[in-house]
Structure formats: C-alpha cells, structure tokens
Image (cartoon, helix red, strand yellow):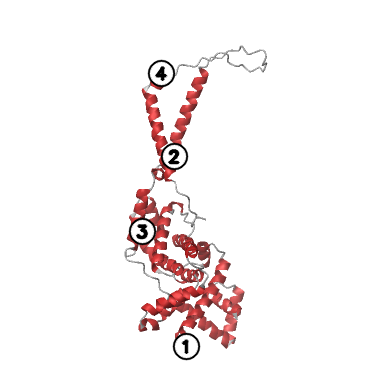
Amino acid sequence: MQSKFTDIQLITQVLAGNQAAYALLIKRHQRFVFTLALRFTKNREDAEEVAQDCFVKAYRSLANYQQQSKFSTWLYSIVYTTAMTHLRKKRVDTTSIDDEALFIQIADTHGSMDANLAERRSRSYYLNMAIEQLLPDDAAIITMFYNGEQSLDEIGEAMGLEPNNVKTKLFRARQRLKEKLERLLKHEVKELI
Amino acid sequence: MNDTEEKLWNYIDGTCTPADRAQIEERLITDVAFKQQYEELVLINAEFTTLELDEPPMAFSYNVMEQIRKQEALAPLKAKVDKRIVYAVAGFFLLAISALLLLTLSNLGWSDNASPSVQTGIKLPVKLTIPDMGNLFNGVWMRYFLFFDMVLLLFLADAYLRRKPKTTAFEK
C-alpha cells in the first residue's frame, strides 16, 4: 500500500520522532534501492546487505539532508557510494571488479540454473540477463535512467559526475547493453527488436 | 556511425541542441537508412523501459527497522545529549573556576618591599598570606561540586571509550 504522504512530509515526520514514517519511506524505495545494489553486487545476499546498510545510513544522516535535490537522488548517491565501497572490499578479498568475463560467467551460470523455457523466451528475461552482464557503472546508469526516473543531472549528482559525462556514459552503456542483448539472442534479436 | 547514433539517442532523450534537432528531423525525411536506424533505436529504447525491478525479501523493511532500533539502543549517551547542555555545563565550570581564582588572588597579601638587587619595578610579594580555604572544602556544596565533577569525568570517559573511527563512505 502506497502512502499518501510525499517523501518530504515523511522525512519531516521521522525527524519529529515518528520512526514508523521511515518504514513507509523504505517500502516506497526498497525495490529500486535493492535493484541498484544488485546491479553492483550481482548476487541477492550481498545486494540485501548493501541495501539495508544504505537505508540505515540514510536514517542516521536524515537530519543532514538539505532537500536541495530529490530524496531519491540523495538516497541513490548513498547506494552508489556504499555499493562501490562494498565492491572495493570484495575486490581486495577476491578478484578484480573490472573483469567483465567474471560477470558474464556469473550471469550465464545463474541463467542456466533457474531459467525455464518460457522464461528464456521472454523479452524481459533476456534484457535482465544482458544487464546483469554489464559492468556495475553501466548497469547502474541504465537502471537509474530507465527505472529510477532520474535526469542526467540527477544521475550526475548521485554518481559524482558532470551531466555531460553521464550523457557519454549512458550512450556507451546503451551500446554495450545492445551488444550483450544481440549476443544473447543471436538470431532471435531480429525477432525481438 | 557512433556519432550519428549518439545524436539519435540525444534526439530520442530530448537533450540535443535545437540546431541538431532541426538537422535530424530534416534527415529523417530524406534519408531512409537514417530513418531505419532511428526507428530501431526507438524500439530498443522502448525495450529498455520495460526493465523490471527486483523484489527484495519480504522482511526487508522490518529488518532495516530492527537494525535501526538495535543501533539506537547501542548508541552512546553522548549522541542523545544536546550539545547546548554540554556547553552550558562547561561554561558553568569555567566561571566557577575563574571566580575561585579571582577570589584567591584578591585575598592574597601583597607587600611592596621589593629586593633592591632585582630592581625590576615589579612588586613581588615577600610574605604571602594564603586565605583559609578549609571552610570551602569542608562545605556541603563543595562535596556536591566534587561529586558532580566525578560524574562528569565518568561520562566523558565513557564517551571517549565508545568513540568509533569516522567513515567517509557517502559523505561528500
């Protein structure tokens, strides 16, 4: 059930001591925050940990939120930095995050394990599979632009980039996503697009 | 190729310049291949908008709220005390110490029998008469004062021991 209050109204209530209002804010943004975290971590357990961490951090810093940008933009900037920190830690523990092949391998394994034939043929299945194979930055930009309803300026704010850089990165990310999709679908891509 | 595609994406997003827009619109009418490329990108764009969000576990929001409650319960007293109260207490003690110092200095017995060999012109006390502070230290108020000092010291020690290193994860 969606709350009738705006984000700002809910934040005001939280700052006034109504902790329950924060639960409504979480419910409103949890799907996007979780998805964005998943774009970086590539597995649900880590994504849940990162997303939870983000909401706790946001709660603790809520008094510092200046309301100069949308709450979602501010929240996504927390997701971005938290996820990047998580990746850096993981990289120290395991291998390089720049190893694109690793993501492809993970996505392929995941795909072969739980996909049934009907799913395999659905458009969204292939698209989600393709986005899983992108590098974290590319996947995050695509997700923020198409799912997060964020403008180029807002994405830049969340990722600490200039809008022109975001524009270029978005263009490249789209190209790579298109390539991945084409590679996945091979001959089926012509049928799809 | 890339430049054309980039321009087309900007046109689709509505972020291109008016000059580019006019140029693209004109080319869309005259160039069939260009129009075909544009239509393909429009279809891909529409496809991208169908990207679905993943659903977090059912207990996600409950888990976050639990984590917040746990952290709040563990938060040191320092975080809950208004800083103004701390400043007021510090101010009170500074005033009290200053007043005590002034009182002590004003009750000192000064003598102008300066040593002739020094000749500095500074009046050095030859015989200091320290005021009797015994009454003050035996008083009930002084005991309260020292007790309060002790509590404050314990509070500061607690705050110091609980202090964690600051993280700069998302703060700009």
**Same chain for the residues at labels 2 and 3, yes or no?**
yes
**Same chain for the residues at labels 4 and 3, yes or no?**
yes
Give the label on residue B84, or none. 2
Which residue is label 4 attached to?
A: B135
- Asked which secondary structure carries label 1, the reply is loop
Disc nearest the viewer among 4 and 3: 4
Tell me residue A19's x, y (percent). Answer: 34, 53
Give the label on residue B64, or none. 3
Asked if residue A18 can be seen in this view, the reply is no
Disc nearest the viewer among 2 and 4: 4
- Asked which secondary structure carries label 3, the reply is helix
Between the residue at mark 2 and the residue at mark 1, the CA separation in whole angstroms equals 70 Å
Between the residue at mark 3 and the residue at mark 1, the CA separation in whole angstroms equals 45 Å
**Same chain for the residues at labels 2 and 1, yes or no?**
no
> Residue A124 sits in which quadrant?
bottom left
**Same chain for the residues at labels 3 and 1, yes or no?**
no
Say if B44 sits above or below B89 in the image.
below
Q: Chain of mark 2?
A: B
What's the residue type where badge 3 is placed? Val
**Foreground: A4 or A83?**
A83
Tell me residue B56's x, y (percent). Answer: 36, 67
Q: Which residue is at 40% across, 28% downward?
A: B146
Q: Chain of mark 3?
A: B
Which residue is label 1 attached to?
A: A187
What's the residue type where badge 4 is placed? Asn
**Foreground: B121 or B52?**
B121
> Residue B61 sits in which quadrant?
bottom left
